Amino acid sequence: MTGPTLMLVLHAHLPYVNPSGAEILEERWLYEAVTETYIPLLWSLQRLLAEGIRPRLTLSLSAPLLAMLGDSALMARCRAHVARMAELGAREATRLAGSDLAAAAEFHRQRLLEVGATLDRSGNDLLTPFGQLAQAGSIALITAAGTHPVLPLLADDRTRRLQIEVALQIFEQRFGFRPAGLWLPECAYAPGLDHLLAAHGIRWSLTDDAAVRAAYPPVKGAVLTTPGGVALFGRDQAVTRQVWDSRGGYPGDPAYREFYRDQGYDLPLDEVAPYLVEGWVRSDTGLKFYRVTAHGPGLMGQKEPYRPAEAAAQVAAHARHFVERLKERTGPIVAPFDAELFGHWWFEGPAWLEAVWRLIASEGEVAVASPDEWLAAGWAPPLAQVPPATWGAKGDFSVWVGPANDQIWPELHKAERAFWAVVEGRAGAPPDSPLSPPVLEAAGSALLLAQASDLPFIMTGQTAVQWAEREFRTHLDRFWAALDQQAPAMPTWKLPIAQAVVATAPKTPPDGALHILMLSWEFPPNNVGGLGRHVHDLGKALVGLGHRVSVLTACMPGERPDEERIAGMRVRRIARPPETDSFLAWVYQLNRSLQQEALAWANQAGPFDLVHAHDWLAGQAGMGLKAAWRVPLVATIHALEQGRNGSINSDLQAAIHEEEIRLAQTTDQVITVSEAMGKAVAWYSGRIPTVIYNGIDLPGTVVAAEASPDPYFFFIGRLVPEKGVQVAIEALSHLPPTVRLLVAGKGPMEAELKEQATRLGLAARVQFLGRVTDVDRDRYLAGAVAGLVPSLYEPFGIVALEVMAAGVPVIVSETGGLREIVTHDQNGLRVYPGDPHSLAIQMKRLLTDGALKRRLVAAANRDLTERFGWSQIAAQTIQVYKRIFTKSL
């Protein structure tokens, strides 16, 4: 598959219509598709298979279409409709004999007879022959999500899971297996859907090529792998536009049949009345005797007769043109279409497909494959994240949310919330039996049918608006009636709601101790910042409260993967992914590795009850495990990219910011380590976090101080601009020449800071210690006048607690969480961020006022005991866990 590989995907879908009485106009949508698309496509595939040609077409059959094609009563009505149209076709062939329209009329008469014969041979069952083609390796069958909703527009992941599971159950019941691919209705994708798809065993899906082009980090080619491990195939606009464009593409050729001119409108009403709905509603009959001829307003009456032989010649020419274009390409060529384009909208479409497949098979220069086969061949698409997108106009969601239909979405979201509230046992329902199975089926079926994308699409298109509005209102009225425990009429299509709710329900929480999986990209002794230490100390305290804690983290460079017990925790380190040019791609690979390892580890360590991810760097793995295991996800967000940099200034920063917000919106509960961080997360994500401060272990023994003839201040942390070391160095220049500054830590700013000290004449007074151990940190702190935390941005500032625990005063910037830890002149001193003069003033106070030092240290020690002990913090964390289980299960 190194040359061009065509992956053709046809999506067959129609809005669900199932009349029980007299014929309605909308049911003809199905009859037209059966007559003009599904049966002609079946003919082409069966002829090719008889010749030994397997085109490897991927055919998506939506759940609504499966329900209609599998409804024997509805298909019997379809057969009766075909018979009536064949009768009209025979009358027209007789009437037009000898005229310019004779060839077209006879062609249509014969075709309708063949359609009727095919239905008779199949027993009005078209699904079986398509299944036989799949078994023969001619086609690959997949399905689409549920009732064909725009999944990103639904309000709740539980509803998205329900829609996916319902579709898979319907497909499996019909064909005996679950597909590896899933068509996302309207090709509507948003980050996070990949985790839900993967949890249902879906390996691939499709989206618009504009989304793939906008992927971050950028990718080459038409296929990528999402952070959730799902391959996304982007449609090739350059190739597909030629096929679907009715003006500049093949369907608009003058020789092809004109779609919009039909005998249902041309014939006098009294002649065509017996073949119309209710005898008077003008509609298409499928008898279209004219060709495109020319485009333009007012030209419909000037169309020339349709000549099947001339159209067939153009089919051959266009098939040749298409295949020659394919030969100019390399790699995968992804070509997804609505199936109804072929035959219904473009009458010659099935014949064109057949001609293309014959040329490809005879020449052997272009490969054909299904996405399943392409992935099975060992291709590994690059990791990237794509933005929300559809294949609608502009590539966004405006077709489904706009002035013509935006009023339906608040109602749909209200219904969603009500459904899950009752399913969970709230809203006055008994907790042990929130919904009886019949009511559950009625309410769930009505809700999912109301979510179909066809309804807002039709409202926007202004085609059958009254029908769409009536269907929407009928479904919602039935939904509310069911929730009121009335005796509603069941929807005509009863979906397997009860089984799907059970299959997608969260796991039942344990009665006693929890088994918690912590995800962190760093863990002691590999401490890049304070996050790893937080995870260690929180996990240790949770174990102390009787819970099981397992930690999954990554090795640092040069280390080997291993597993060990630390402070009662099981800690497993996995191999770090190889470094790449893209930091974000590296993070996605890290998360995939964490997730895969966690899935395997669960088989050994026993099932996990809850996942706790720390920061966005482990967020994707957390989201994936939440979906896979159906367990709650808690996320502690320790810092935000916006705060670290002051603003978002690059594509990478924007991508990280989006990942942080997505994690906050996906998790069952967000924890932040300060009120300041909580306000920032709430502002950006709309989620209200629980604030649980960082903690500290008070030292059991007094550490011997570093011997020093001169007073010194001590800083420890990463050498990056937001930590404010540059402010401390400048403040030192305002202090007596005997005062020194000790700087512990490493970072990209080290050379710049050394140059600053030299420039200010402070090179001998500023000592850079590099990384130090915890023991050395405490030794340096014990001998210091004070510990400095001059940060410009600090979500919490655990180093301030470490200084306080060492029994020395702390000076902090009045920013972020530091303002919540330190109260000025009570348990520490505060200075203005980025102001060396303000810092120098407070440093001078501590150099000269011994009583102030003793008072600050005593108050700090009381605060550490009462507010920042890890046992209190672990107890608060367990309360968060318990609230999640109480709320969501």
Image (tube, rainbow, N blue to C red):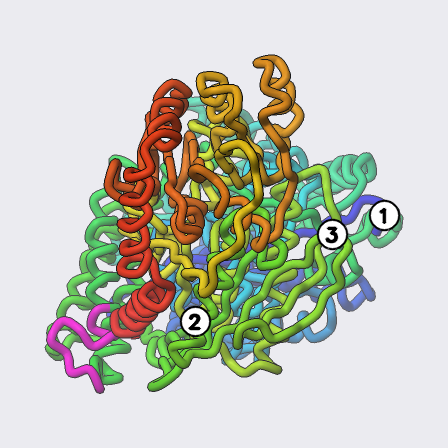
In the image, what residue occupies the spot 37% across and 35% down? Answer: 812
Distance (Cα) linking label 1 and label 3: 35 Å
**What residue is shown with label 3?**
557
**What residue is shown with label 1?**
2
* Mark toward the start of the polypeptide (1 vs 3): 1
Name which residue type carries label 3: Pro
Image position of 464 (left or right of 776):
left
Image x and y of residue 604, in percent: 61, 82
In the image, what residue occupies the spot 43% across and 32% down? Answer: 790
Distance (Cα) linking label 3 and label 2: 29 Å
* Mark toward the start of the polypeptide (2 vs 1): 1
- For the record, the magenta segment spans 421-432
Q: Based on the displayed image, in which of its 4 quarters is residue 243 positioned?
A: top right
* Mark toward the start of the polypeptide (3 vs 2): 3
Label 3: how many Cα within 10 Å (few below 14, some 14–19, many 20+): few
Name which residue type carries label 2: Leu
Image x and y of residue 513, in percent: 39, 82
- Residue 424, magenta (yes or no): yes
In the image, what residue occupies the spot 83% across and 47% down? Answer: 366
Image x and y of residue 719, in percent: 57, 34
Tell me if residue 61 can be seen. no
Q: How many marks?
A: 3
Q: Residue furthest front?
A: 709
Name which residue type carries label 1: Thr
**What residue is shown with label 2?**
610
Say which element carries label 3. Answer: loop
In this view, the mark in front (3 or 2): 3
> 424 or 741, which is in the foreground?
741
Distance (Cα) linking label 2 and label 1: 44 Å
